[in-house]
Amino acid sequence: MSAPVRTNERPGTRATARHIRMSATKARAVLDLIRGADVRSAEQILRFSERDAAQVVLKLLRSAIANAEHNDDQIGDDLVVSACYADEGRTIRRFRPRARGRATRIRKRTCHITIIVSRMSEEELERRRAREESRPGSRAARRSGQQATEERRRRTRRRRGGRSGAAGAGEQSSGQTSEGEAGAARDEAGAEGQPEPESPDEGRDEPAGDEGQAATSGAEASGEAATPGSSPGAEEER
């Protein structure tokens, strides 16, 4: 059987404050409030605590979170206070004068406070995310609502794009059908022997304007001259 892990050997990122001018007993009373809690809940507990030791522990907790984020590339919201303890430090001795020339010893205690933070397990993270999303007005609830809205918009755009594509394909297919029907009608007309109607400008080689009239009059004159029996000699002979 493996030996249990000691408190000061717990894995994680730590921060230590040494020679704090208070007794270890007073510091332990505050550390017991945040042991095992996530860092955000621990900050709230320490912020509203009425003990003087809470201010020192709060600064130390923020230092441990900063060490985890900058040194170990951890996410601050995913951390939990895995271990925290206070050890006795050096005792400062002072004396107070008393009656009859005597003196009384005064002991000024100090302590060393250590906080260790580590990342939560995956099960705990999933449970926490579900709890945050179910709570109305939270940041996770707003984020999930925004993601759901974006997903609905994407589905709507895809649906509208599909409808427009189907409409374009339908128009194209109808145009192809009308062209096919026109071609079939032309084939049937050719098979029955009906000539296709010519365009009004097809086969017209006559000149237009004054030149056309002059050419017509010249052709008529030449035709009259070439007609037999139309000359005066022929009339005299008759």
Image: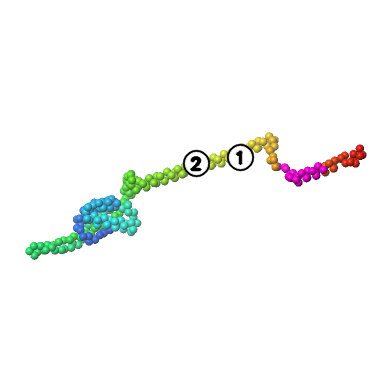
Q: Looking at numbered disc 1 in the image, what kind of residue is underneath it?
A: Glu
Label 2: element kind? helix
In depth, the one of 112 and 60 nearer the eye is 60
* Residue 14 image position (x, y, % from top left): 28, 57
Q: Residue lying farthest left?
A: 100
Query: What residue is shown with label 2?
Result: 163
Residue 41 visible: yes
Check the image and report above or below for 225 versus 13.
above
Q: Amino acid at mark 2?
A: Arg
Q: Residue furthest right?
A: 237
First along the sequence among labels 1 and 2 = 2
Distance of label 1 from label 2 (alpha carbons): 25 Å
- Where residue 59 appears, x then y in whole percent? 27, 57
Question: Residue at image x 63%, y 39%?
Answer: 183
Quarter of image, res 149: top left
Residues rendered magenta in the picture: 202-221
Q: Identify the residue under disc 1.
A: 179
Mostly what secondary structure, the magenta segment? helix
Nearest the eye: 12 or 66: 66
Looking at the image, residue 34 sits to the left or right of residue 185; the answer is left
User: For this rendering, which residue is in front, 118 or 215?
Assistant: 215
Q: Secondary structure at mark 1?
A: helix
